[in-house]
Amino acid sequence: MDFPVRSAGRAVASIALLLTAGCAGGADPPPARHVVVISLDTTRATHFGFLGNTQIATPQMDALAEESIVFTDFMTVAPTTLASHTSLFTGTYPHHHGTPRNGFMVNPENEMLPEILQAEGFHTAGFAGSFALDRRFDFAQGFDHYDQEFDLLTDQAGVDQNQRSATHVTDAVLAYLDQSGVPDRLFLFAHYFDPHRPYDAPPQFVERYDPEPVWDLPAIEDLKQRGRYPPDEKARHAERHIRRYAAEISYMDAELGRLFDGLRERDILNNALLIVTSDHGETFLEHREQFDHGAEVYQTTIHAVGLIRLPDAQLGGTRVDQPASNIDLLPTTLQWLGLTIPEGVDGASIDLGAPDALSRRRQFGQATKPAGEVEAGQRWANMRKARFVRQGPFKFIQVPHRNIEALYHLAADPGERNDLLRDPTAQARALADELRQALESWAASAAPLPSTFERPQRNETIRRLRSLGYVR
């Protein structure tokens, strides 16, 4: 069996030409007065038209993609909110920044992107969409202004977490800009939480997807043959979840469009380096973890949204097919701004002039759940949880606490249904041996900064996280 390695595409190669033509010596970054980071919580990359989904309406993001560099194979390193966002803002893996999962503190020794830009004269403003990024967890390091005025509140008997709708996130950002004025240099962070369970979009968006089911899944017949499709009653319940999730994506897309328009009208968008990403996705029926995230490292939760819009939409419409990761966004941002990248960053600046380097890199990630016994007696809480290594189109998975290993060829098997170790060839065994050694070496390199479960209001924290499946 041959194992081809994906080569750089024409679109990627064109970036090098454009950068060389548009920048002195091909090395100077495009100018950007502002940096805007928009995070979409629990958002499957496969749910957007610009990545090929024709069933779900996402006209605002599709339009932005035409003005942006689109990373079609973008990954998160951790499939829950706080660990993933801390990696986004530090450029480091969780086993270095030290925040294993939701509910833990972000160690103040971490050098966060808002802190770096604040020191460079940027005014820093953040808008959190949910309790997972509450300032009590010390995630708000480096923000001059951090807004977490949640409008959807739960009492002590509630089964959800404090959050706010996409409408109110957009309202809060635009109101703040109008009240404070647009500074000479702005770092803006906006977090949208809507696609997270429970899927509860406004009625006009839900109606778009009723009664027809929207299946962003393998073929139904294939699910039945593999025993993954549930009995009739459960199937109707599952289809309802999938329709509601699609409605959340379309609703969030509409509010993102309102934000993009507001940034354009306030002369921010065309002078900004704009990043849109998702912290992780969501698994439906494809694997063991259903309508959830955090315990597995399949593509349903690891494949993330990755867009970068340069000032004046330079290089708009370019598509990069090589794997990249959310820990790459901090060094990429700093390099494009001409700033020094801190020591100890795990990510790499994406050199668009040499895209082949992306294909040669190994990239890693690790689950954040389950909690409890799996974490006991470990120097790093996630040591025995599911983890993966990517090398080109290949993905090797280990789940130490369940004694599971698997190898997938994502180009030929994007749904991760054909484990090459089930009936391995000699070549598959050799590749698995190589990737196993790399993954175990990476796992053994864990040197986390100290972190503890959030102490103030600890009982409230546990209750809210337990309601969402983060604590058992």
Image (cartoon, grey):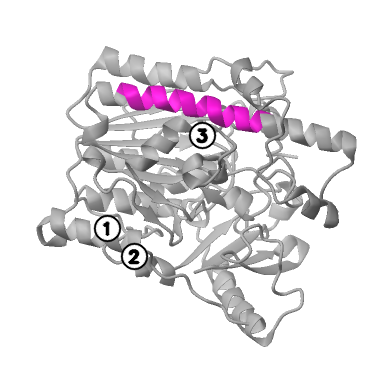
Q: Residues within 10 Å of mark 2 (few under 14, many from 20)?
A: many
Type of residue at label 3?
A: Phe
Type of residue at label 2?
A: Pro
Query: Is the Cβ of the residue at disc 3 closer than 8 Å to that at disc 1?
Result: no
Give the spatial CA distance, label 2 vs label 3: 37 Å
Task: Judge depth for marks 2 and 3 and give the one in front.
Answer: 2
Element under disc 2: loop
Element under disc 3: helix
- Range covered by the magenta-colored residues: 244-262
In front here: 16 or 122? Answer: 16
Query: Is the Cβ of the residue at disc 1 closer than 8 Å to that at disc 2?
Result: yes
Q: Earlier in the sequence, mark 3 or mark 1?
A: 1
In front here: 177 or 466? Answer: 177
Element under disc 1: helix
In front here: 45 or 106? Answer: 45
Residue 241, picture quadrant:
top right
Circle 1 is placed at which residue position?
15
Circle 3 is placed at which residue position?
137
Residue 378: x, y in percent? Answer: 65, 59
Residue 411 at least partly seen: yes
Q: Earlier in the sequence, mark 1 or mark 2?
A: 1
Seen at 74% across and 61% down, the residue is 401
Residue 153: x, y in percent? Answer: 61, 16
Return the residue found at the far left: 24
Type of residue at label 1?
A: Ile
As drawn, the label of residue 355 is 2
